[in-house]
Structure formats: C-alpha cells, structure tokens
Image: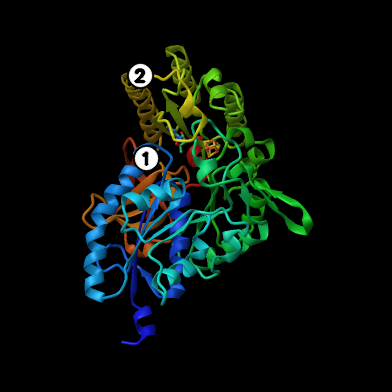
C-alpha cells in the first residue's frame, strides 16, 4: 500500500460534549482533517485518530474526560497493533484549554492537546506527531493572534438541513461564576461578508435553517460593508435575503445586549424563528450583582415584554443557577417569582458549582449542598409544569416542521423522522426518509413534557400559516 493510499483510508472518531459551539467546532475539526485523509466515523473502533471535544462549564467535566480516555485507550492500542502505525488520541475544547498539563500528566498516552482557538493548526500538529522526527506529544493551547476563521478550509462537510454557523466567539462579560472568558478568550466577531459567504455555502449544501452561534452572540460587532461595523440585526437582515434559507436562529444571548433594533428584527423578519434563549441566571438583583451580570430582573422583564410585543408568539427559554454563594431563601423566592412571571417555554437549571480560577470560586458564603438540591427540585418542578402546559397548547394545531434526521436505530425514535418546530420543539413522526431536508406541515396529535408528535399533513388537514396557528394560543 502506498503512503497516499494509506492516507485516504484513515478513520476519525470525534466525541463532543457541551454547547452547540462545540458541535460546530467538531464539524470544523473534521473539515480541517479531511485533506489529510481522515474520514468521520461514528465509532472508535478502527479509528486512526480519536478526538474528545470537551466542555468545562460545570463540575465533573475533567473526571468525565479521564474516564472516557480510559475507555478509549484500548481502541487506540488495538488499532496501533493492527495498522502498525501511530493512532492519535487528542483532547480538544475547553477542558484541554484549562487543564492541558493535568491531562498529559494523568493520561500520558494522550498524544495531542489543543484548545478551541488553535484547531486550524491541526495539519501541522498531526505532521509533528506522525512525521519522520515524530514528537512524543503536542500541546497547543495558545490564543493565537491570527483568527482561526481566516485559516479554516472553505470546503465543508455538509451539516444537513439544520446547520450551525459560528459568528462570534469568546466573552468579555466576566460573570463571576463562568469559565468561558478564560477558556474561549476575548470577544471576537467575524466579518459580515465572511458569514454571508459561509451561509451561502451551507444553503448550497442543503441547509434550510442556520443557527448563528456565539458565546455572547448578540454582542456581535463584526466588520460590515464599506468600513462600517455590523451588529447582529444588520447580519440577520442580510442573511434573511438569502434565497433558499428559510429559518434563522441565534444563540446564546446576554440580556444586556438585547437592544431595540434586535427586538425589532424579531418583529420584522419572518425567517427569524419565534424562539429565544436568553439566560437570566437569577431573579434576585442582589445575586445578579454578585454574579456581575450587569442587568436587573426588571430589565429582563421589560425586554421580554418588548419582545412579546414585537413577536407575540415568541417562545422564551433561559438558564438559571441556584445556590450561588450568598443566595438566601428570599433571593431564591425572587427567582421562582420571575419564572412564574415570564412563563418560559423551556428553561435549563443548574446547581452552582465553583469553577477553578473564577472570582466566585473564592467567595465564602456558600450555600449548603442539600439546600441547593431542594431549591433545584422546586425550580425544576415549576419549569416542567410550565413547559408541559406550553406544549399542550399545540395539541390539534398544524405547524411547519423542518425534518433534519432519521431516528437513531436502537433508540425509541427508530423508524421515525425527527425535526424542529419554529418554537424549537423536538418532534418525531412516522414519515418517509425523503422528507428529511424539507419543511412539512405536521398536525400535532400528542404532546409531552419535552417533545411533540403528530402526523404529516395530507389533504385532510388544512395547512395553516404560522401566525394564525399561534394566534390561537
Ligand atoms: N455553576 C453552575 N452553572 C453554571 N453555568 C455556567 N457556569 C456555571 C457554574 N459555575 C450555567 C449558566 C450558563 C450555562 C451554559 O451554564 O447558567 O448560562
Ligand atoms: Fe459566561 Fe457570562 Fe460570558 Fe455568558 S456572558 S459566557 S455566562 S461570562
């Protein structure tokens, strides 16, 4: 077998944890490795390179990485024996960025550690590990001056009907509990033109929906046209003109950056889906201040009021932390009240966990673990109730669903096709595979706490227009 023939047959296995930005990064990592002959595989068996793309946002992240490394080590050894060539085991993402040295100390069989800002340099790293004067190990957790976006290959593997597009990275907000400003670095926004170009390519490859990603996506301020600076509304209006692109979303936003122009875009742009994830973190102004959130609970309430005025059917989602240092029963009750007032369509909630190196990790007035557990249980009960009540309002309605995948073999959804409603519900129905990649009306016949199901609309149901459907809410 020639050297180049070997190259064309390499298998790449990537396991991804965490946010959608990590999912996007994993796609791009495989794009970078493709010219080197690596093809994505969905199993670690026979893999010539294994990448763990990790998340550091909450506790136990590092332990999960070590236990996965232990599980994957035999695959590496087996494949090395079989192919008589080096199999690369890599740790990427935010745990790599934050704890690179600890990883190689505790798992010396790891070949490669790289952070979220350096994966465009992978060809060079791989050649240092597999070339003639092969290095034992490569660690690259820099924050390089060059932007990775300028060096990533233009060629991308198709992401299918619902694609992610990273437009902004890093964060300058420094919430006291959060590791992101340390693992992802300072805020950086790509230029409007480069994003529009990438969006066109995704649409050419079959994307009907694009979800714009950024750690602080509504703080986007990239280079615009003719030397101007573009903000997120500018970008949304520009992208909405792309023919064939039917749906736009963006995530994750900060309440401070939810300005009137962006709110107006929700009213103006039919393509901008009526769903917004806007983390509040706490309903208590005292705790929001200790978190350095730079907004109050009233400011949040006002933004939601304006959003609902601009787009009455908008579904609101959020993140909440319970048990932040100093959170009293009264503070927690304020969070419960805020959740009651807003009435979320969905909401994620977490117990506070100290992250090494963050300001909150040095705070003294900790909340007891059993108190945190009790608060989280109460909050989650309230949220589940709201979410189920919201989902039930869709019973008997007809909504357009973008189908983007088949149900996984061996899972409960096997034999179904899966997609998303405009309001971000997960939906599965019995339908033909040819509907994947299309937006199809579905008559909802079953509602569950976290998903809906129904039947593809044929002539027996009238297809209704989105706003009419929701007007019945
Ligand atoms: N403890 C608990 N939850 C956290 N989050 C971020 N950092 C922490 C932490 N130290 C939550 C926030 C954020 C979401 C992605 O994770 O709610 O919005
Ligand atoms: Fe973390 Fe706060 Fe930045 Fe969000 S806004 S990424 S929570 S520091």
Residue 133 x %, y %:
42, 74
At a point 41% along the width and 22% down the height, the residue shown is: 323
Q: Residues within 10 Å of mark 1 (few under 14, many from 20)?
A: some
What numbered label is drawn on residue 368? 2
Q: Compared with residue 388, is residue 324 higher up or lower down, i.e. above or below?
A: above
Q: Which of marks 2 and 1 is nearer the N terminus?
A: 2
**Quarter of the displayed picture in which ligand 1 can be seen:** top left
**Would you say residue 343 is visible in this rendering?**
no
At a point 36% along the width and 20% down the height, the residue shown is: 375
Q: How crowded is mark 2: few (under 14 residues within 10 Å), some or many (20 or more)?
A: few
**Would you say residue 99 is visible in this rendering?**
yes
Q: The N terminus is located in which quarter?
A: bottom left
Secondary structure type for disc 1: loop
At a point 34% along the width and 58% down the height, the residue shown is: 110
Tag 2 and tag 1, C-beta contact below 8 Å: no
Which residue occupies the foreground of this view, 410 or 22?
Answer: 22
Mark 2 or 1: the one toward you: 2
Residue 203 x %, y %:
53, 64
Q: Compared with residue 222, is residue 82 higher up or lower down, i.e. above or below?
A: below
Which residue is disc 1 drawn over? 396
Residue 147 falls in which quadrant of the image? Answer: bottom right
Judged left or right of residue 62, residue 139 is right
Judged left or right of residue 88, residue 253 is right
Which residue occupies the foreground of this view, 303 or 325?
Answer: 325
Q: Which residue of the protein is positioned furthest toward the top in this rendering?
A: 330
């Amino acid at each position: 077998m020639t050297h180049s023939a070997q190259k064309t047959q390499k298998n790449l296995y990537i396991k991804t944890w965490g946010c959608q930005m990590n999912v996007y990064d994993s796609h791009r990592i495989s794009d970078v490795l493709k010219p080197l002959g690596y093809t994505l595989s969905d199993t670690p068996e026979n893999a010539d390179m294994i990448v763990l793309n990790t998340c550091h946002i909450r506790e136990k992240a590092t332990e999960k990485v070590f236990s996965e490394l232990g599980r994957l080590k035999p695959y590496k050894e087996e494949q090395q024996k079989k192919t008589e060539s080096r199999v690369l085991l890599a740790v990427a993402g935010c745990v790599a960025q934050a704890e690179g040295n600890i990883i190689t100390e505790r798992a010396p069989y790891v070949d490669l550690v790289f952070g979220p800002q350096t994966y465009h340099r992978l060809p060079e790293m791989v050649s240092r590990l597999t070339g003639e004067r092969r290095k034992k190990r490569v660690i690259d957790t820099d924050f390089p001056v060059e932007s990775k976006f300028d060096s990533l290959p233009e060629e991308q593997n198709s992401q299918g009907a619902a694609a992610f597009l990273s437009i902004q990275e890093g964060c300058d907000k420094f919430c006291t509990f959060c590791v992101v400003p340390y693992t992802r670095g300072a805020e950086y926004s790509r230029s409007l033109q480069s994003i529009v170009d990438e969006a066109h390519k995704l649409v050419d490859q079959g994307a009907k929906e694009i979800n714009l990603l950024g750690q602080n996506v509504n703080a986007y301020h990239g280079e615009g046209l003719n030397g101007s600076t573009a903000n997120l509304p500018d970008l949304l209006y520009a992208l909405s003109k792309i023919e064939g692109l039917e749906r736009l979303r963006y995530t994750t936003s900060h309440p401070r950056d939810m300005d009137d122009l962006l709110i107006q875009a929700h009213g103006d742009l039919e393509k901008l889906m009526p769903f917004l994830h806007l983390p509040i973190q706490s309903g208590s102004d005292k705790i929001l201040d200790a978190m350095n959130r730079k907004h109050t609970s009233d400011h949040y309430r006002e933004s939601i009021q304006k959003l609902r005025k601009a787009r009455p059917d908008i579904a609101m989602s959020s993140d909440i932390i319970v048990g932040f240092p100093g959170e009293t029963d009264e503070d927690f009750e304020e969070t419960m009240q805020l959740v009651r007032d807003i009435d979320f369509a969905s909401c994620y909630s977490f117990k506070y966990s100290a992250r090494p190196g963050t300001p909150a990790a040095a705070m003294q007035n900790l909340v007891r673990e059993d108190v945190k557990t009790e608060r989280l249980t109460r909050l989650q009960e309230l949220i589940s109730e709201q979410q189920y009540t919201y989902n039930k309002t869709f019973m008997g309605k007809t909504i357009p669903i973008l189908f983007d995948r088949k149900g996984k073999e061996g899972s409960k959804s096997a034999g179904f096709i899966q997609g998303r409603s405009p309001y971000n519900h997960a939906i599965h129905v019995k339908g033909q595979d040819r509907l994947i990649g299309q937006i199809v009306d579905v008559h909802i016949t079953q509602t569950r706490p976290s998903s809906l199901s129904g039947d593809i609309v044929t002539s027996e149901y009238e297809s209704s227009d989105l706003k009419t459907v929701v007007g019945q809410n």
